[in-house]
Image (cartoon, rainbow, N blue to C red):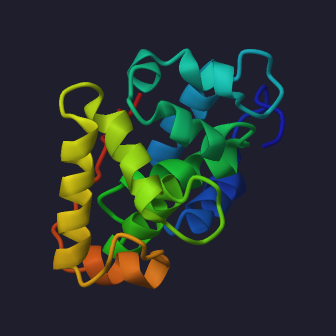
Amino acid sequence: MGNTSSMLTQYDIEEVQEHCNHAFSQQEIVSLYHRFCQLDRNSSGFITGDEFLSVPEFAVNPLSQRLLRMLDGLNFKEFVAFLSAFSPRISLQQKIEFLFKVYDFNSNGKVTFDDILSVLRDLTGSFISEQQRQEVITRVLEEAGYRRDSSLVLSDFMRILGSSQLKMEVEVPID
């Protein structure tokens, strides 16, 4: 599986399925493998940040730079595991764990007011002012029982988002 010029065996497919908690069917994994091979232009078995940025939908995503730090240098199995966060077959807890990693920009296991502000800045651009962003975040944190100077850990994210109807889904076209 390391070399993208090889084909997936049934064993490879089952191994990837197990690795991503059966978030994708075997047919979807084969389709993802073909897409992975298209992105891996130098056939190294890994996808670089530049290769990810060649996908127009990814390049224009306001969170692309945050996601790149999670994506750069992924092999196929890691690529599928990353995409599994967008599968309707995974649990809300797994989706929240993924979101936590997006917000935890410095990977220290904590999300601060400034981390949330940075994501909101990426998402809103110039559509709202810095003061409005800060007010929104402060209000949301206070409603959830936190202060502006709180550092949120994964369990806090679970508590805040756990009762939500969070939707993060993508459809995998089957070739």
Q: Name the residue: 80% across, 22% down.
A: 43
The residue located at (66%, 51%) in the rendering is 78
Nearest the eye: 156 or 18: 156
Q: Is residue 4 visible?
A: yes
Please state, as top left, top right, bottom left or bottom right, where the C terminus lies in the image: top left
Estimate the x, y position of residue 156 in percent, counting from the top left: 39, 81
Q: x, y (%) of residue 51?
A: 64, 20
- The foreground one among 74 and 80 is 74
At 83% from the left and 27% from the top, the residue drawn is: 44
Q: In the image shown, does 24 or 107 lie closer to the viewer?
A: 107
31 displayed left or right of 9: left
Quarter holding residue 16: bottom right
Tell me: 157 left or right of 132.
right
Q: Is 126 placed above or below 87 here?
A: above
Residue 40 relative to residue 52: left or right: right
Give the quarter of the figure containing the N terminus.
top right
Residue 154, given in percent of the width and then of the height, sits at 48, 77
Vertical comparison of 79 with 97: above or below: above
Above or below, comparing residue 57 to residue 113 in the picture: above
**Residue 23 visible (yes or no):** no
